[in-house]
Amino acid sequence: MENTTTAPEQIGELYDSMTRMSEVFNEGQEHLAYWYGPDDDADAVTAGLRLTRKVTDALGLRRGEHLLDAGCGVGAPGVMVARETGVQVTGITVSRVEAAVAEKRVHDNDLVGQVRFQHGNYEKMPFADGTFDAVMAIESLTHATDLPAALREFHRVLRPGGRVALSECTRAVGPTGEPVASMPDVFRPNQLLTTHEWVRALEDAGFAVEEYTQCGPRVYGLGLRYLDRANELHDTLTQEFGPDAVASLKQGYKAMFGGDPKAMGYAVVTARKPVVPASAA
């Protein structure tokens, strides 16, 4: 694992500054998108919804269950999941601005009582042991300052038999184990792991890993399509955020996705908190 450098408060400030842009750019789906291939003409928002569904489908959510959205952003994925599956959703984010926008989204969608979002750190949560049936973490654990602590917290707040699904960009390695690519510093990653390192991290936290999918070519490999989205919204973005912000946005996407499309992968990993047999309790 790489050394951590960015504190939760700094991550919160980063996302405070990005909140309005994400609302305009991808309607609050603050994560990458999933395309079926180069001939898939879905727009970035539609493809982003697919990725949320890919993660939640891996969890096998059932109506009435309680889902923790760890790193919930502005709440768009959590609200969508609540509407489509009937689960109760609690989300947590280190960004105070995101938390406020997410709570407004709850009210706007008449989901008060079913969905709630709050400001906080998923490495130390105010929830009782065994509160949740499932946890999803979509591209949020790369920011963890103490990844083992975060995963132990996920384990603690899950009931026995509860599930966790995470999705992250994953590090590809060369023949001698050296990194092939890195994530631009603007995203302030605290770790960029291989798929198998994510699996081991979950296992070290006490989870039993049940499935992992490497879908890098359909996610990271097609990431330059975000430039198409930026060009499509150029006038709108320029009017609201200014030309320098738009140029910076485009440059960021070029830096992240403009190299070898095979240089980085994207994984969805699903695991379960084991049920301890009565004889072993």
Image (cartoon, rainbow, N blue to C red):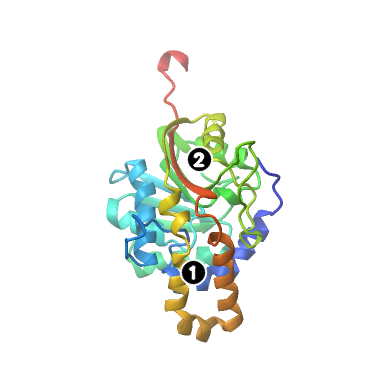
- Whether residue 168 is visible here, answered yes or no, is no
Give the residue drawn at x 44%, y 27%.
274
Residue under the image location 51 percent in, 54 percent down: 71
Q: Secondary structure at mark 2?
A: loop
| Marks 1 and 2, how far apart at CA | 32 Å
Q: Nearer the viewer, residue 165 or 61?
A: 165
- Local crowd size for mark 2, using a 10 Å CA cut-off: few (<14), some (14–19), many (≥20): few
Q: Nearer the viewer, residue 53 or 106?
A: 53
Label 1 sits on a secondary structure element that is helix
The answer to whether 218 is drawn above or below residue 130 in the figure is below
Residue designated by label 2: 128
Residue 148 locus on image (x, y percent)? 61, 37
Q: Nearer the viewer, residue 4 or 91?
A: 4
Q: Of marks 1 and 2, which one's residue comes earlier in the chain?
A: 1
Q: Left or right? Give the position of 225 relative to 2.
A: left
Category of crowding for the residue at label 1, using alpha-carbon neighbours closer than 10 angstroms: few (below 14), some (14–19), many (at least 20): some
Q: Amino acid type of disc 2?
A: Ala
Q: Which residue is mark 1?
A: 22
Taking the spot 51% from the left edge, 39% from the top edge, the residue there is: 195
Quadrant where the N terminus is found in the figure:
top right
